[in-house]
Image (cartoon, rainbow, N blue to C red):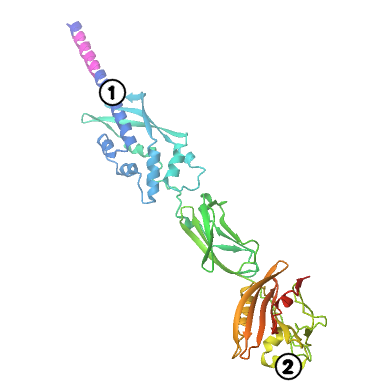
Amino acid sequence: MNHSKKVISMALVASMMVGTCSCSAKFENSVMDKADDLGKFIVERNYKKIEKMAADKDKELEAVLTLETDSFPEDNDAREIIADTLTYEVDEDSFEGDFFGKEGSIDIVFTYVDYEKAIDDIAIFEGIDSFEAAIEDCDDVVELTITFEFEKIDGECVCTNIDEIKDIFPYATEEFNWALSRDNYIGEVEFIGLGSNDFYLDATAISCELPITGDGQELEWNYYYMIECDGIFLLTSEVMSSDGTSLTADYSYFGDPLFGEYTFTFYLADDTYLASGTIMADLTEEEPEPEPAPVEGSYVGPYYIAPADGVIAFPETNLVLSLPYGQICIPGDNPALESLSSTDPIVAQFMLFFSVNPIDNSGAFAMYIPFVAYDSPEAINSFNQAVEEYSVEGVSTETTNTEFTVGDYTYTVSNITATAADGTVTYLHFALVGDEDSCAVVYFFSEGVDNYDVFIGGFSMN
């Protein structure tokens, strides 16, 4: 009888042990399944599904899994990019559980990009694409193992330490350095080489720079500039790159001195306006040459000459006029010039010579125009005025134009044929002669016979 009781007791114990082992095995399988689901939901950052597997809610974890803060929108996008690298693996060999299948734990190994190493050498990001590229180029990873605890509560296997999930997202509130608009990283246009002035003086070149400040020196700058002078467009530069400290611009014009108000305007390569600066360029005023004073005892100015040989050398040129035979140069103190000095002092001041031939009533004189080229608008205007001012009442005129060449220069002559009421014919010729430095209006006249060829033939070059 006793032996039978012992057998029965042992059978009961064995039965209980088999049942307990069966429950423990089921619990282990349940934990592994739950762990795999938990790992997947963590990678997905699906708080609602995580919460259904947990013993308690965790609002702080819920906020962490959104990866959102009130900082720049790019920060939220950057955290998402890091989170997209997150992976998990359940370490099934790490399971530990109690004998009765009520409590147990298991390890899940998480890996994600080591974002700190990925961005360690990058001071500032210009847009989310540059951040994503840095993450994609990084081969370093962070490996984190978390032991998750599970219990059987009301017949359900639930996780009791979901708060540790926060450790997988240390970057949940991380803020990164994002580039602002480029105007936040520039100073004001500075002109170089002004000395003590606030303008350029007698300068043949203008240089300026636009300083790059702060984090802007870590960015790539592709830019161009435009230049205007007194509101007139001059040029647009090619697109160029900066050295990281400043944007530079230069202007010159074949080494000529610059004059006017110059405006330099900088743009990014995509035509975004950056800044502009304006500077004056001036020239030293030349002291005006003193007005020539009349020669003592003379009725004409200092340019006047009366060579005895009748050879006229035009000042500041190589041009020479040999007057025809019989022409006599009147001295500057001759009373015949007194009326000219009183009636037209400007003509007297710049008269070069005056000659006459008392036998045939022919003559010539010249007005000197200093420092004016023979083909300049000023010279041509003076010449036309001299021709147009010839008018005598009762005299009919006919005008033609001819040209003659002396050396490398071709000169214009206006020829006037004047016929008086009594039939007397006078021939008048106005010639504009000289070179690039100075010129003169020469006037020839003759009565009855046209001495054009005789006068014109007297010109030569030394």
Q: Which residues are magenta?
A: 5-19
Residue 111 visible? The answer is yes
Residue drawn at point x = 45 percent, y = 56 percent: 272
Label 2's element?
helix
252 or 214: which is nearer to us? 252
347 or 226: which is nearer to us? 347
Give the residue furthest to the left: 1
30 or 456: which is nearer to us? 456
> In the picture provided, is 353 more to the left or to the right than 379?
right
- From the top left corner, tell me how far across and down residue 294 is, in percent: 75, 88
* Residue kind at label 2, given as amino acid type: Glu
> In the picture provided, is 187 more to the left or to the right than 296?
left
> In the picture provided, is 388 more to the left or to the right than 326?
left
Q: Quadrant of the C terminus?
A: bottom right
Residue identifier under label 2: 338
Residue identifier under label 1: 29
Residue 15 part of the magenta-drawn span: yes
